[in-house]
Image (spheres, coloured by chain):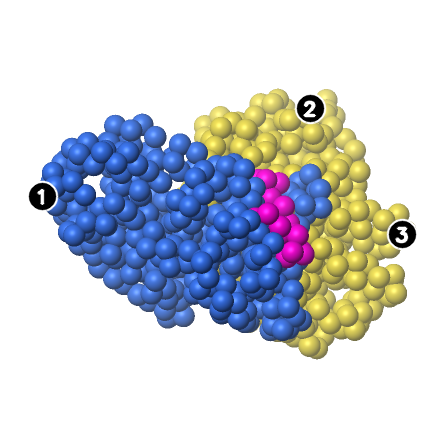
Amino acid sequence: MSENITLDTSTIDQLPEARQAASVHRSAAIPDSASLQAIFQRHHLLDLDDFSAPELRLLLQTAQAMKEVLARPVRKVPALQGSTVVNLFYENSTRTRISFELAAKNLSADVVNMTASSSSVTKGESLIDTVRTLQALGADFVIMRHSQSGAPYLVAQQIRGSVINAGDGWHAHPTQALLDLFTMERHLGSVEGRKIVILGDILHSRVARSNIWSLTTLGAEVVLCGPPTLMPPAVLASVAGSSEAAPLRRLRVEYQIERALEGADVVMALRLQKERQDAGLLPSLREYIARFGLTTQRLALAQPHALVMHPGPMNEGVEIAHEVAYSEASVIEEQVTNGLAVRMAVLYALSQARQHA
Amino acid sequence: MNEDTAQTSALLLRGGHIIDPAGGREFTGDLLIADGRIAAAGPASEVAPLAETLRQSGQQLRTLDLHPGLIVSPGFVDLHVHLREPGYEDKETIQTGAEAAARGGFTTICCMPNTRPVLDSQATLEFVARAASAAPARVWPIAAITKGEKGAELSEMAELAEAGAVAFSDDGRPVSNSKLMRSALEYASMLNRPVVEHCEDEALAAGGVMNEGPTATRLGLKGWPAAAEEIMLARDLALVRLTGGRYHAAHISTAGSVELIRRAKAEGLRVTAEVTPHHLLLTDEWVAGRRTGLLGDDGSAQSQPYDTNTKVNPPLRTQRDTEALLEGLLDGTIDAIATDHAPHTFVDKACEYDEAAFGISGLETALGALLALVHAEKLPLKTLLAALTIRPARAFSLPAGTLESGAFADITIFDPDERWAVDPRRFASKGKNTPLAGVMLRGRVRSTILAGRLVYVADTIEQSLALGH
């Protein structure tokens, strides 16, 4: 890193200058306020379903710059100095919470963590009460994880600050999809025309839903692979040719893992909850592993350069074999590292959009 | 009911456009009310002499002069409302629910038994009758099919019928046990009362909060598939065939259900069915914040996704379903429009979608919403009014829904063209839970008459109605 990059200054306004200095490395440019303003005008990040390709690209570019910030000896920039970020987690997620916490701290924000078990806070008035309290205390960003789809929308209606959806029910996990996209593009270049296989329990997966939006928006070919009982019924209907069901674009469904993996550029395995068997969706874990487990032999059907991904936490030996998870092809740890840069980029982009709103 | 509150004075409605689907009549003319009953309806030349005779006999006669653009209809009949009392008075009471009915033009409402305690005993029906005695609408109770709506043992149906139950239902839940449903149909046929089913295969719909389909997939919400309704309806129709019982399907919501009812009727089974305004007019797109369809046309546009006021059971379906339901209404397959008025408190709805209570507060928006179909020329006004008056009255054998001489003088006067924006804060109902907040409707109740007595007059026209001549 060149010596004249001094991001560790006390005002956010110096970030664009830093961008110029850093632009020695082309990809490291932090988009300046003007281009952020022009392209990214969101107050919240709740879902990726209505993101345009330029918006996605802008966030990826910002994340790249953040990644380089993270490579420096002093990893802190002042972009969010004086801002309060609240991590409001109604569902346990050590990995996502810590990632957001570090991202906010690297941007010099003050971070407060709130965890509540969903069981003790089942009624909505509690959620609204909590949010009003956060509002009264002046939270600028609320990063929210909740077991119920749509809960961040409820919060977004109640609060002046920005809400970042850190995963809601089966609905969306936008920063996970962004970090997945970022990781893919670092290795493959553009995902356009690439074959991305999402493997496993699609029905209950917010990760799959968000990835489907971002990947198809950027022109990737997405193949969903898993048993029909773990596919959203609407996806089955659309694949069956029902005209009513076209919720998710450019999707294919494969029940045969070998066919799904053939020529794949990326294989993303999803965690299989063991409760699915009790719910009557699977005959047995044994049969699932036999038919849908990602093994070394099966991975060999994919491209030689194929990436193996997993949003974690993994069930090694269930959806993914131990050898695959730790193989050369695996970028699972890198996903975690990239998550930090992506979340810094999201916080930064939202803060810029707010300043110029 | 309300006969004793009828005024002894006579009332002459002069100059409105009278539509009486029961008699197949439609004309501009006069309507004379005496002793709380219809004395005559016809051209002014026929009615005026009768009014004069009454006046000369010493009767006090009041006259309301109506603008010829105003429609005079039999008071509306709603086969399906939740009045929440006893037990949930924070959501609604019999009095506030009846006030909401009067504002919506409904003069006869049938209340569902899923109260606390459940309406499954003579005492609870007596309580309802007492609470409704001074209410601005006739309230007929529907009693529970099973004790406590627990789906285990039949309620004392004969005694409940004697105490005023006009039908039986475990609404809110289906009778899942087929043997028990068979018994209910058989036993109720002795009483000549319909058994009203909430059609839902509970295992298949379990946990579902909206229609299963692309929108649910997109929103990550658990689907409640159309098949869950159709399976239960098909089972019930097989039981009706087996027993010869009298059956009414509550709030059908799917194209498949319309077809099942159509075939059952063709076969001659004793079956009737109702549809709600929201299932006719709204789709599951509204859950995603997209106000599509006739009520969204004016661009009042986007609301937020996950608006819990769109959460209702059965859920809002697809455009194809709304079209099939309309077709069913047009060809007579569907007998009645019922609101399934389901008031809830703010707190019941101000929460996560999964946690929110099911239901829409529907009495006060029904007419304005339904008239959108008439204005769009998809539904003749007379057909609409038949489904709001005589046809539901016949389905439950209620003394209502007609302007024949001698009938109760229960009358709704409405302006089919008045435009107004839905503002739930102004509802008489305690339930402000409507997905139509802010939507512009065209058509509004001006005045509601119960047993010859004005029980509701819209603020906007108090002056224009010539009261007390």
Is A44 in front, or is B400?
A44
Residue that appears at 54% across and 37% down:
A193
- Residue B463 vs B269, above or below: the answer is above
Q: The yellow chain is which one?
A: B
Q: Say which residue label 2 marks.
A: B28
Is B467 in front, or is B342?
B342
At mark 3, the secondary structure is loop
Q: Say which residue label 1 marks.
A: A10
Mark nearer the viewer, 3 or 1: 1
Residues marked 3 and 1 touching at CB (< 8 Å): no
Mark nearer the viewer, 1 or 2: 1
Which span of residues is magenta-colored? A246-264
Q: Mark 2 lies on which chain?
A: B
**Whole-percent x, y for residue B317 in the image:** 63, 46
Question: Which corner quadrant of the image does residue B248 belong to?
Answer: bottom right
Q: Say which residue label 3 marks.
A: B268
Q: Which chain is blue?
A: A
- Residue B190 vs B82, above or below: the answer is below
